[in-house]
Amino acid sequence: MQNKLENLKEKMNKSILKDVCFDDKQYQQVLNRIEKSKSQKKVFPLRNKFNALLSISVVSIIFLGITYFVETQLNVFNELETKQANEPKENIQESTTKPTNEKTIYLPPKLEENYDEMTKKEILTKMINTVDNFETATGEFKVHYGHSSGYSLVEYAISLGNKSGGFGKRSNIVNGKEEITFEYYTEGTVWALSEQAKTYMDSKYAEDVNPGTPLKIEDAFSVNSEGDNVTNYRERPPIGVANETLFPYEIASNYTRDLSKWEIEKQNEELLGHNTLVIKGTKNHRDFQSFRFWVDKDTGILVKYETYNANGDIVDYLHPTKLEVNVPIDIKTFTPNLEGYEKNDLDRDEPMLRTGNIDELVPEDLKGQWEEAKKKPNVTTVLELNGNWYIYVKKGYLVNYIESNGNKGTLYLAKTSAEKTGHNFKALAEGYKVDTLKIVYE
C-alpha cells in the first residue's frame, strides 16, 4: 500500500504553502509567541493555587462559624435543661429549710359522697367505726337536752393521723347567761380553758394510742352472764365537745344495738352538702318514745338527731349548721393562746375534780382493780390512793360534785342525758382531805 505521507512537506510547499511567506521575521514572531505561552503557563498555576487556597479558607471560616453557633446553642439548651432540672430540687430544699405558713396546713384527700344502698348492719358498722372513715372535720351545731332549760352552741375542728390535734368551743346558754369553755389537744397535751374564770388546766395524754381494728357489730355489742349489756368502743381523740357527732359510739349503743327497734326510713337525703341515711326507731324512755338519726353514709358521722315524745314533739336534738369533712385545717389552731389565763395548779391545796378519760392517770397499784371495775358497768366503784379518789360511775349517772364535812365526804351522782345513759363516766378527785366517800344518787 502506498504511503500517503511520504514527501508530505515538499507537496505542501508546492501546493498549500506556496504563497505563504515565512522569513526570519515570522520565524522570530513564532519564537516570541512560544516564549510568551511558556510564561503564561507559569503564571496560571500560581493563580489557580491562590484561588483554591482562597476557596478552602472561605469554606473553613464558614464551617467554623457554623460549628461555633451550634455549640453555643447547645450550651444554652443544656444550661436551660440543667436549670429546669435543678429548680424542683431547689424548691424542695427551700421548702424544707425555710419555715412557711404552708407547713401548718394539712390537706387530706377529698371524700366522695356515697349513694349506694346500705343495710342496717352496714350503717351501724360505720357508726361504731367512724375513726377510720375520715381524716379531718370542722363543724358547728346546736344541742339541747329535754331536762335542761338551756342549750349549747358547739364549734370544733379536728385532725386525725400524723398531724393529729383538735379544738373545741362550747357556749352553754341558760336563762340568757353564757358560759364559754375551750378544749385543745395536740402533741401529747390537753388544755381546758374557762373564758369566765380566765383559768386553764393542762394534762398529758398518750399520743401514740392505737385506735384498734374495726369492730364488727357482734364484737361491739354483747351480753354478760348476768344479763347486762356489754359494749366495746373504739379509741377516740381526747376532745369531748364533738364526740356526739363525730364519734357517736354511745348513741349507737343505746339506740341502735337492737336491729329490730329501728328501720331505715330513707336511703338518701342531702344535709349540709352530705348524703345521709335517715334512721327512725323507738325507745322506751321516760321523756321520749322515738328518735330519728341522719347518718353520713361515707363516714358514719351522726350529722343530726332528734328524739320525740308521744305527741311527736321534739325533746332532745342536735341540729348542725356546718359540717365539712376532709378539708384543709391549720394545725396552729390546736394550740391555745394562754395570755391572760391563770393555770389551775393541781398541786395546790384546793380540791380538784377532773372528769373524762382518766385511764392514763390511774397508778399501777390500782390498775388491776380499775380494770375489774370496768367489767361491772352497772356498779359504781371508788378507789383511793394517797388522798386521790378514782371513780368509775355506773351507767346512767355522772359525777356532779363532792361535798366534804371534816374527814367525811359525799359523792353526788346525777343522771345523764338520755343519749348517754349507756355510757360509764369516770372521774378523778384530788385534794379532798376525806377518809371516806359516801355515794348519793340524785
Image (cartoon, rainbow, N blue to C red):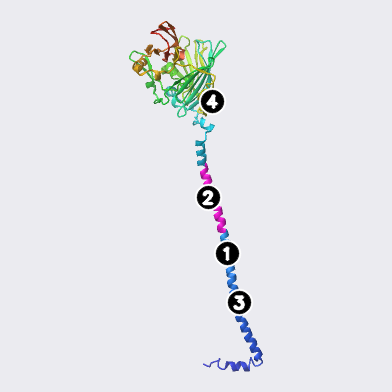
Q: Which residue is mark 1?
A: 59
Instruction: Characterize the local packing of mark 4: few (<14), some (14-19) or many (20 or more) Cα atoms within 10 angstroms.
Output: few
Q: Could you give the CA–CA distance between mark 2 and mark 3, rounded to whole angstroms?
A: 53 Å
Whether residue 280 is situated above or below residue 38 in the rendered picture: above
Q: Which residues lie in the magenta part?
A: 66-87
Q: Which residue is mark 4?
A: 273
Q: What's the amino acid at mark 2?
A: Asn
Q: Secondary structure at mark 3?
A: helix
Residue 253, image quadrant = top left
Are circles 4 and 2 on residues that touch, CB within 8 Å?
A: no
Q: Earlier in the sequence, mark 4 or mark 3?
A: 3
Which one is earlier in the sequence, the residue at label 4 or at label 2? Answer: 2
Residue bearing mark 2: 78
- Residue 327 vs 53, above or below: the answer is above
Q: Amino acid at mark 3?
A: Val
264, 7: nearer the viewer: 7
Q: Nearer the viewer, mark 4 or mark 2?
A: 2
Distance, label 3 to label 1, CA atoms, is 25 Å
| Mark 3, other Cα within 10 Å: few <14 / some 14–19 / many ≥20 | few
Q: How many numbered marks does the figure carry?
A: 4
* Helix, strand or loop: magenta stretch: helix
For numbered disc 1, what is the local secondary structure? helix
Give the mark nearer the N terminus: 2 vs 3: 3
Q: Secondary structure at mark 2?
A: helix
Pointers 4 and 3 in contact (C-beta within 8 Å): no
User: Which label lies toward us, 3 or 1?
Assistant: 3
Secondary structure state at the residue bearing disc 4: loop
What residue sits right under mark 3 in the picture? 43
Which of marks 1 and 3 precedes in the sequence? 3
